[in-house]
């Protein structure tokens, strides 16, 4: 991830500002705060980009799941029809074999 982060929590915690006659050096504090602001802007941009990626992936997953579900239902219908035809063919063959083997004795 290329976010160009300049600070860490430890650097912020350990930062000491020089004091002048009236307190901290205003320029030094302003420069430090500028870096913090830049980092926060980088974090916000990175988070927004990641959220967009997450949303895109969620949408792709929903689409894939719905397509998978519709394909599954399409697969089941023909296979059950095929199974019924196959069972009918098998029963027909058995009946023909019984006639051939047993002849008219079967229906007496």
Image (spheres, rainbow, N blue to C red):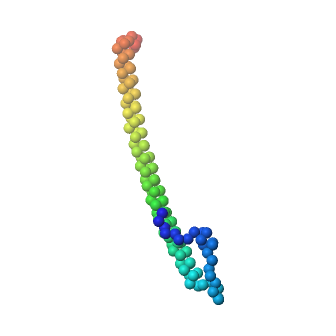
User: Is 87 rendered above or below residue 49?
Assistant: above
Count of number-bearing discs: 0
Residue for point 63% across, 77% down? 16
Residue for point 49% across, 67% down? 3
User: Is 80 rendered above or below residue 12?
Assistant: above
**26 relative to 54 in the view: left or right:** right
User: Is 33 rendered above or below residue 107?
Assistant: below
**68 relative to 18 in the view: left or right:** left
Residue for point 60% across, 84% down? 25
Q: Position of residue 88 (x, y in %)?
A: 38, 27
Residue 8 in view of the camera? yes
Task: Write down the quadrant of residue 22 in the picture.
Answer: bottom right
Instruction: Please name whichever residue, 88 or 51, is drawn nearer the observer in this view of the structure.
Output: 51
Instruction: Please name whichever residue, 14 or 106, is drawn nearer the observer in this view of the structure.
Output: 14
Quarter of the picture containing the C terminus is: top left
Q: Position of residue 40 (x, y in %)?
A: 53, 72
Residue 44 in view of the camera? no
Instruction: Please name whichever residue, 78 or 71, is drawn nearer the observer in this view of the structure.
Output: 71
Residue for point 40% across, 45% down? 71
Q: Position of residue 20 (x, y in %)?
A: 63, 86
Q: Name the outermost residue toward the bottom.
A: 21
Task: Write down the quadrant of residue 95 in the picture.
Answer: top left
């Amino acid at each position: 991830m290329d976010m160009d982060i300049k600070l860490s929590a430890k650097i912020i915690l350990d930062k000491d500002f020089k004091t002048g006659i009236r307190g901290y050096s205003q320029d030094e504090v302003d420069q430090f705060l500028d870096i913090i602001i830049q980092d926060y802007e980088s974090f916000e941009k990175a988070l927004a980009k990641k959220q967009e990626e997450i949303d895109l992936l969620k949408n792709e997953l929903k689409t894939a799941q719905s397509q998978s579900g519709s394909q599954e239902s399409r697969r089941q219908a023909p296979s059950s029809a095929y199974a019924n035809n196959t069972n009918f063919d098998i029963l027909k063959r058995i009946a023909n074999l019984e006639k051939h083997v047993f002849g008219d004795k079967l229906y007496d």
